[in-house]
């Protein structure tokens, strides 16, 4: 009788036969990805804030599109900020958070408690504020790089100011 072929060795069943998909890529921004889980978390956070504020909820498809677009822009800006070396240290972040709390006439701890009660973990809030500061610094960098005032413009302005002061 003919010999039975040996069972293949070193081969595994295809992953799709037994694996569960945990996450997948929603969008690729340059060399980084935004996962479907990241997108879902952001949508849930926004929905929770809208419910807490009593804001009307947009159509789910519109909300997903808007959040996706916002995350793409944010990710691209953060990448650019990294390229420029824009950073926010913890002390600056803490001062900014203290000012936010003060503007709301709260202590940082009171604000933290209120946020966590609304479902916003404080570390997530800190990350969001850090990103906002980074993006603000990036915008300032971009504006500074594009604004150029000539000596003639300065002279004209000073002459106009002097003339206004005389009158």
Image (cartoon, rainbow, N blue to C red):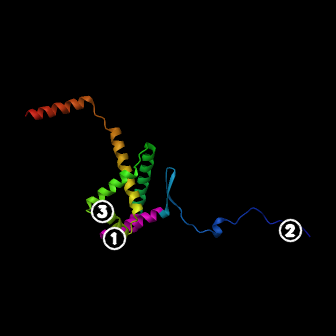
Splitting the image into 4 quarters, where does residue 127 fall?
bottom left
Q: Residue at x 45, y 62 (%)?
A: 39
The residue identified by callout 3 is 107
Horizontal and vertical percent position of residue 125? 38, 61
Comparing labels 2 and 1, the label whose residue is closer to the camera: 1
Residue 4: in sight, yes or no? yes
Q: How many marks?
A: 3
Dominant secondary-structure state across the stretch colored magenta? helix
Q: Residue at x 43, y 43 (%)?
A: 84
Could you tell me how far apart the alpha carbons at marks 2 and 1 are, in whole angstroms?
A: 67 Å
Numbered disc 2: secondary structure: loop
Horizontal and vertical percent position of residue 117? 36, 70
The residue identified by callout 1 is 51
Comparing labels 3 and 2, the label whose residue is closer to the camera: 3
Q: Earlier in the sequence, mark 2 or mark 1?
A: 2
Could you tell me how far apart the alpha carbons at marks 3 and 2 are, in whole angstroms?
A: 77 Å
Magenta stretch in the rendered image = 38-63
The residue identified by callout 2 is 4
Numbered disc 1: secondary structure: helix
Could you tell me how far apart the alpha carbons at marks 1 and 3 are, in whole angstroms?
A: 24 Å
For label 1, count other residues whose C-alpha is less than 10 Å away and answer few (under 14), some (14-19) or many (20+).
Answer: few
For label 3, count other residues whose C-alpha is less than 10 Å away and answer few (under 14), some (14-19) or many (20+).
Answer: some
Determine whether 111 is above or below 146 in the image.
below
Horizontal and vertical percent position of residue 36? 49, 63
């Amino acid at each position: 009788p003919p010999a039975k072929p040996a069972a293949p060795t070193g081969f595994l069943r295809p992953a799709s036969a037994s694996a569960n998909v945990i996450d997948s890529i929603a969008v690729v921004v340059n060399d980084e990805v935004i996962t479907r889980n990241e997108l879902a978390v952001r949508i849930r956070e926004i929905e929770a804030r809208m419910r807490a504020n009593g804001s009307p909820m947009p159509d789910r498809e519109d909300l997903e599109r808007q959040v996706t677009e916002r995350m793409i822009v944010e990710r691209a800006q953060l990448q650019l900020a990294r390229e420029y070396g824009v950073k926010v240290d913890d002390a600056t972040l803490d001062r900014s958070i203290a000012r936010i709390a003060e503007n709301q006439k709260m202590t940082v701890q009171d604000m933290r408690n209120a946020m966590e009660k609304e479902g916003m973990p404080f570390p997530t809030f800190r990350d969001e504020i850090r990103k906002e500061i980074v993006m603000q610094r990036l915008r300032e960098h971009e504006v500074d790089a594009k604004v150029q005032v000539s000596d003639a413009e300065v002279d004209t302005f000073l002459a106009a100011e002097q003339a206004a002061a005389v009158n």
